[in-house]
Image (cartoon, rainbow, N blue to C red):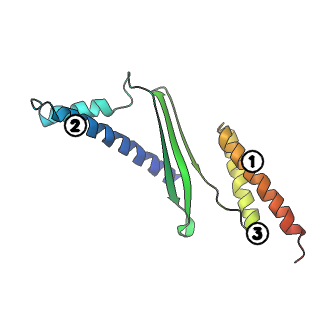
Amino acid sequence: MRRICIISASLWACLTFSFLAIVAAVAAQDSQKTPMEWLTKAANASDIQVAGMPPFKMRAKVRILGDKNQQYEGTFELLWNSPTQWREQAGAEVGAIPSDVAGTERYLEIVSRRLTHAIAKHEFSNARYYDQQERKARALLAELRAEPS
């Protein structure tokens, strides 16, 4: 969760610097202004908390480094309408289902936990994905347990 917060902060910083660059380019055309006026104008233009900011949707693909240097692909999405109406959503791909019983049981625990969390947070598209993954894992686990050793 801490890594997702760091990624969220990084995305906010990128968004702010993008606005700063745009405003700085426009301000550069007006040579009458002082650097402090440029920075003030840039800060005001890049603040998405102010009224009148147009709605936008930002989506990013992220890589999260997990235990034992394992990488997980994920997404971050920000839907912005106003300072009182916005939504952030982050998700990570679960990865391939293991081919042994112990690994599949652990995978099933993780997917079940994520399914419960997605339902609790009303993230129904994620819940559908995790439900499909859980069904696949349960079917594979039944096959693995039915095979003679």
Q: Judging from the image, what secondary structure is the residue with disc 1 in?
A: helix
Specify whether 45 is left or right of 94.
Answer: left
> In the rendered image, which residue does mark 1 sit on?
131
Q: Type of residue at label 2?
A: Ala
Specify whether 92 is left or right of 45.
Answer: right
Nearest the viewer among 142 and 7 is 142
- Mark 1 or 3 closer to N-term? 3
Pointer 1 with pointer 3, Cβ within 8 A: no
> In the rendered image, which residue does mark 2 sit on?
25
Pointer 3 with pointer 2, Cβ within 8 A: no
Q: Position of residue 24 (x, y in %)?
A: 22, 37
Q: Which mark is residue 102?
A: 3
Q: Which mark is residue 149?
A: none
- Mark 3 or 2 closer to N-term? 2
Q: CA distance from mark 1 to mark 2?
A: 48 Å
Q: Residue furthest bottom?
A: 149
